[in-house]
Image (cartoon, rainbow, N blue to C red):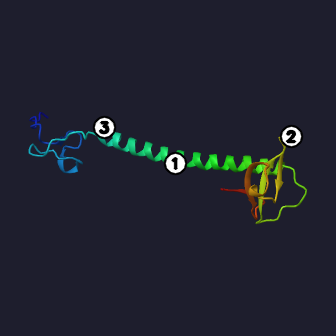
Amino acid sequence: MNKKKKPDNVVFDEETQQYTASLKPYATDVGAPAITTTDTVAWKNRNIHAVNKQISAKYLELKAEYDAMMDQFEYNNLVYSAKFNFEPVIGYTYHLYRNKNEEAFLSVIAPHECNFDYLGTFKLNADKMWEQLKD
């Protein structure tokens, strides 16, 4: 069977012997808009920049939280390793000093009432963690 060749704009399936233009997900007519690839480079670059900023901000937030936690760990370790001859009461304010032998000790005496080497002021919270109070 010798068939006449169809023009390029006619979509004909040789296997099924049917016109399939209506089944295509794209336009097949000569007057249809041209199929062009979308330039996604600008979109990718914009989104890469936005994602990088978001990840960087989250990293800085986590790093600040980690640094604060490490500071809290260090001064809790310092206070708990200090010498004191009393049982600290939750919610009370205590002052940390260093003696002549470079040993830390905890006291109820305020820094303006003595001339010890002052290290900081702390309060014991309900979780038994020392909170550093700013001067």
Mark 2 / mark 3, whichever is N-terminal? 3
Q: CA distance from mark 1 to mark 3?
A: 25 Å
Type of the residue with mark 1? Lys
Observer able to see residue 129: no
Observer able to see residue 3: yes
Residue pictured at 45% horizontal, 47% vertical: 54
**Which residue position is annotated with label 2?**
101
Foreground disc of the pair 1, 3: 1
- Residue situated in front as seen by the camera: 2 or 36: 36
Residue pictured at 10% horizontal, 34% vertical: 5
For residue 8, the mark is none
Mark 1 / mark 3, whichever is N-terminal? 3
Position of residue 68 relative to residue 1, above or below, is: below
Q: How would you rate the neighbour count of disc 1 (Cα within 10 Å): few for under 14, some for 14-19, many for 20 or more?
A: few
Spot occupied by residue 38 in the image (x, y as percentages of width and height): 25, 41
Q: Are marks 2 and 3 in contact (CB under 8 Å)?
A: no
Position of residue 48 relative to residue 135, above or below, is: above
Mark 2 / mark 1, whichever is N-terminal? 1
Q: Are marks 2 and 1 in contact (CB under 8 Å)?
A: no
Instruction: From the viewer's perspective, tell me whether residue 133 is left or right of residue 87.
Output: left
For residue 58, the mark is 1
Type of the residue with mark 3? Val
Instruction: From the viewer's perspective, tell me whether residue 50 is left or right of residue 14.
Output: right
Q: CA distance from mark 2 to mark 1?
A: 44 Å
Spot occupied by residue 55 in the image (x, y as percentages of width and height): 48, 45
Residue pictured at 68% horizontal, 46% vertical: 70
Residue pictured at 22% horizontal, 50% vertical: 23
- Residue situated in front as seen by the camera: 32 or 93: 93
Type of the residue with mark 2? Asn
Foreground disc of the pair 2, 1: 2
**Which residue position is annotated with label 3?**
41
